[in-house]
Amino acid sequence: MGDGESAEVLRGLEAAGNFIRRELASMLHIRRIPELRFLEDNTYAQADRIEEILRDLDVSPELDVGPEEEEVTSADSNAGGEGAEDDAAKLSDG
């Protein structure tokens, strides 16, 4: 949805807010119906932007860690309580 279209939809929902609230009151049978507020949800636009950034990243193949290397790295980091420096040295040596 474009910005103008979103604003128009929000104005329409705000105008219909009291009607929607009355309808909810008749269906829910509770003493107080909360005030309704309508906000634009930008989740999909933000997710699209993140995916676009990730697609545009130039990752060299040598930085890609395969499943076999992950298993070795995980096993090494759990063995004997060695620090991150020792793990890094192991990876650079072999």
Image: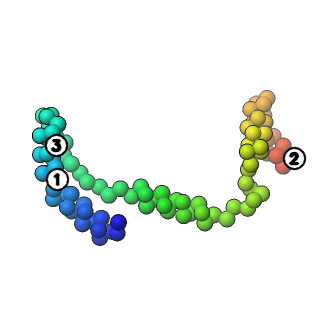
Q: Which residue is mark 3?
A: 24
Amino acid type at circle 3 is Leu
Q: Nearer the viewer, residue 92 or 63?
A: 63
Element marked by disc 3: helix
User: In the image, what residue occupies the spot 21% across and 57% down?
Assistant: 13
48 to 31, vertically: above or below: below
- Quarter where residue 43 is shown: bottom left
Amino acid type at circle 1 is Gly
Q: Residues within 10 Å of mark 2 (few under 14, many from 20)?
A: few
> Residue 84: image x %, image y %?
75, 41
Cα separation, mark 1 vs mark 3, equals 10 Å
Amino acid type at circle 2 is Gly
> Residue 32: image x %, image y %?
14, 37
Q: Residues within 10 Å of mark 1 (few under 14, many from 20)?
A: some
Q: Which mark is residue 17?
A: 1
- Quarter where residue 26 is shown: top left
Residue 27 visible to the viewer: yes
Q: Which residue is mark 2?
A: 94
